């Protein structure tokens, strides 16, 4: 812990808070990834080609 406080130039309390926040974010990220992978396996995920997006934007501009 002393090494980290010196290296990051933060007190122990700040390092612990930061670490806990990072760990919690890791849990959330893993949950989102698992949901995505489940959706991907069931065929619910669809990628849109950049050319399709460009066409959609151009069509919106023409219809406005």
Image (spheres, rainbow, N blue to C red):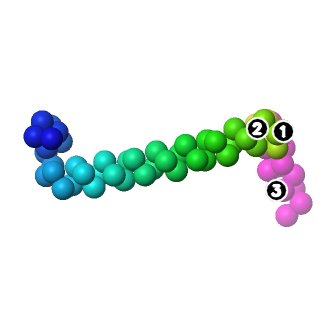
> Residue 13 falls in which quadrant of the image?
bottom left
Alpha carbon distance from label 1 to label 3: 31 Å
Q: Nearer the viewer, mark 1 or mark 3?
A: 1
In magenta, the rendered stretch is 51-64
Q: Are marks 1 and 2 in contact (CB under 8 Å)?
A: yes
Find numbered disc 2 in the image and state the secondary structure of the residue it sits on. helix
Please name the residue that numbered disc 1 is placed on: 43
Task: Please indicate whether residue 35 sits to the left or right of residue 8 in the image.
Answer: right
Please name the residue that numbered disc 3 is placed on: 61
Q: Are marks 3 and 2 in contact (CB under 8 Å)?
A: no
Badge 1 local density, few (<14 within 10 Å), some, or many (20+)? few
Residue pushed farthest bottom?
A: 64
- Can residue 48 be seen here? The reply is no
Q: Are marks 1 and 3 in contact (CB under 8 Å)?
A: no
Badge 3 local density, few (<14 within 10 Å), some, or many (20+)? few
Which of marks 3 and 1 precedes in the sequence?
1
Alpha carbon distance from label 1 to label 2: 5 Å
Find numbered disc 1 in the image and state the secondary structure of the residue it sits on. loop
Q: Residue at x 36, y 53 (%)?
A: 21
Task: Please indicate whether residue 26 sits to the left or right of residue 44 in the image.
Answer: left
Residue 48's x, y, as percent?
79, 39
Badge 2 local density, few (<14 within 10 Å), some, or many (20+)? few
Q: Is residue 56 above or below residue 43?
A: below
Residue 31's x, y, as percent?
58, 47
> Residue 43 falls in which quadrant of the image?
top right
Residue 60's x, y, as percent?
84, 56
- Can residue 63 be seen here? The reply is yes
Q: Residue at x 31, y 48 (%)?
A: 19
Please name the residue that numbered disc 2 is placed on: 40
Q: Main secondary structure of the magenta part?
A: helix
Residue 41's x, y, as percent?
78, 35
Task: Please indicate whether residue 50 sits to the left or right of residue 21 in the image.
Answer: right
């Amino acid at each position: 812990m002393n090494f980290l406080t010196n290296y990051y130039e933060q007190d122990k309390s700040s390092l612990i808070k930061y670490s806990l926040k990072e760990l919690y974010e890791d849990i959330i990220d893993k949950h989102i990834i698992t949901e995505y992978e489940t959706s991907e396996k069931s065929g619910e995920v669809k990628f849109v080609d950049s050319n399709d997006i460009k066409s959609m934007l151009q069509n919106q501009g023409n219809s406005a």
